[in-house]
Structures are given as C-alpha cells and as structure tokens.
Amino acid sequence: MMLSAPLPLVELDPTVPPVAVVIWLHGLGADGHDFEAIVPQLRLPADLPVRFVFPHAPEISVTAFGGQRARAWFDFDPAGGTDLPGLTKSMLQIQDLIQNEIDTGMPAERILLAGFSQGGVMALHTALYYPKRLAGILALSTFLVEGDKLALAKSPANEKIPILMCHGQQDAVLPMSLGQSSLAQLESAGYAVKWREYPMGHEVCLQEIQEISRWLQAVLGSGG
C-alpha cells in the first residue's frame, strides 16, 4: 500500500520492451535529471534494452544547507549524522517505485538500484533489506548506514546480490575512507563487493562510466 504521494520521475525507455530496469537515485541537492545524460554514455548494446528511472527526491529543509529547502532523501546534519526517520520514509517510497515496475511486468530480480552520494545510501539501504531478490546495487561515492546491524537484519533474498562500489580518491565531500569502511562492513556481513576507486573528487569520471557499463552488462545481460 502506498503511504505517500508517488515520487515524480524522469523515465528513459528503450525503443523495444525492456529486459531490465535501473532505478537511479541522485545526490543531495540535485534532481532526477542529474544522471539522465549518463545513459547514452553507457553505450549498452542493442540486445540489452534497459529502462532507466530517475526519481526526484522530495524537497525538505536541509540542516547542512542552513535550513534551506532542497531535494534530499533525508536530512543531513554534519554534526548530528543521518536522519534515520527520513531515510526510512524515502526507503518506503523507493520500495513503491520497485513495486510499480513489478506491477507492470518486470520481475524483481531484473530491477537494479543505483545511486550517487545520498542516493547511494538509499540504494544500499533499500536493496539490502528488500524482501525479494533484486538484480544488483550500484553505489557511487557513498556510504552504508547502520552497517553494524546489517549482519542480523539483512534480507536473505539479497545475500548474494551483486554490488559495485566506486569512489573518488580525492573526494572532499564524502572521504574515500568512509566508502572503504562501508566496504569492510559489507564484506564482514558476507557480501561480495566489487570496489573501484578513481583519481577524482565527488563526481563521476569517464573511466568509471565505462566500468559501470561493463558491470551492468555482466549483471543484467544473462537474463534478457
């Protein structure tokens, strides 16, 4: 049952029926258009038609921005950490997006969650606890929330989920050490994670996009 208004979306559909769906979540202060341009850069083959869904996070008051309203999946306070109630609310909205794709005929195991920065937090948190098997998690320049609870609370359906984590070595917004500690928590909870790091800041580079394309083709290509 949908508990709140559905999130507005940017949708990019292939010219033929899709064999998979990628739900891509933007970072703090951005919107669903932020990663729209990455789709043609991925150069996915014609025999892997993928539907891309880029939701807009709700506009909320963000403590880190002095209380100004911005699109955010949860409030962020550099002194106080992650807004867990807000994170849970957004997780439920993302679960609704997954269910919408299932309702239109896409199996859950052909739906992949991707996210950058705060969106990556949501991709990890939503997929790791989701009760049905999903295709994979793409976590870019991000970190894991409540990693100490994961081993006991994780979803058995997604214990073997493919995960690609990428991070910039010069990231001044979310230091790479934060991503590395999240990687360690995931591995200690039993997940097999592919880790890639690049000489960049809090951004995405061409080499990373090429790696993402290879990974998507490997993860999604077998079930088309």
Image (cartoon, rainbow, N blue to C red):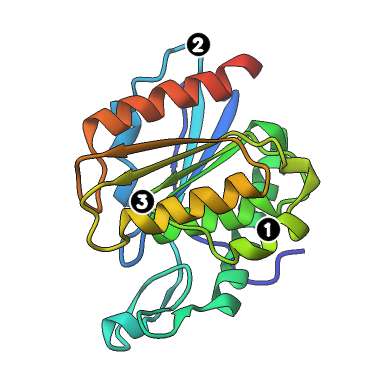
Q: Residue at x 43, y 85 (%)?
A: 80
Checking the image for residue 220, the label placed there is none
Q: Residue at x 22, y 61 (%)?
A: 172
Could you tell whether 95 is left or right of 61 in the image? right
Instruction: State the residue in front, 125 or 167.
Output: 167
Q: What is the secondary structure assignment of the residue under circle 2?
A: loop
Q: Amino acid at mark 3?
A: Ser
Give the CA distance from mark 2 to mark 3: 29 Å
Answer yes or no: do the residues labelled 1 and 2 have beta carbons within 8 Å?
Answer: no
Q: Which mark is residue 47?
A: 2
Q: Residues within 10 Å of mark 1 (few under 14, many from 20)?
A: some
The picture places residue 129, in percent across and down from the top left corner, at: 70, 54
> Percent x, y for residue 8?
48, 59
Residue 88, given in percent of the width and then of the height, sits at 62, 70
15, above or below 74, in the image: above
Farthest residue toward the bottom?
67
Give the numbered dot on residue 150.
1
Provide the residue designation for mark 3.
141
146 sits left or right of 72 in the view: right
Amino acid of disc 2? Asp
The image quadrant of residue 21 is top right
Tell us which disc is closer to us: 1 or 2: 1
The numbered mark, 1 or 3, whose residue comes first in the sequence reads: 3
In terms of image quadrants, where is residue 118?
bottom left
Give the answer, above or below, for where 127 lies relative to 73. Answer: above
Label 3: state its secondary structure. loop
Kind of residue at badge 1: Leu
Q: Earlier in the sequence, mark 1 or mark 2?
A: 2
Quadrant where the N terminus sits is bottom right
- Distance, label 1 to label 2, CA atoms, is 36 Å
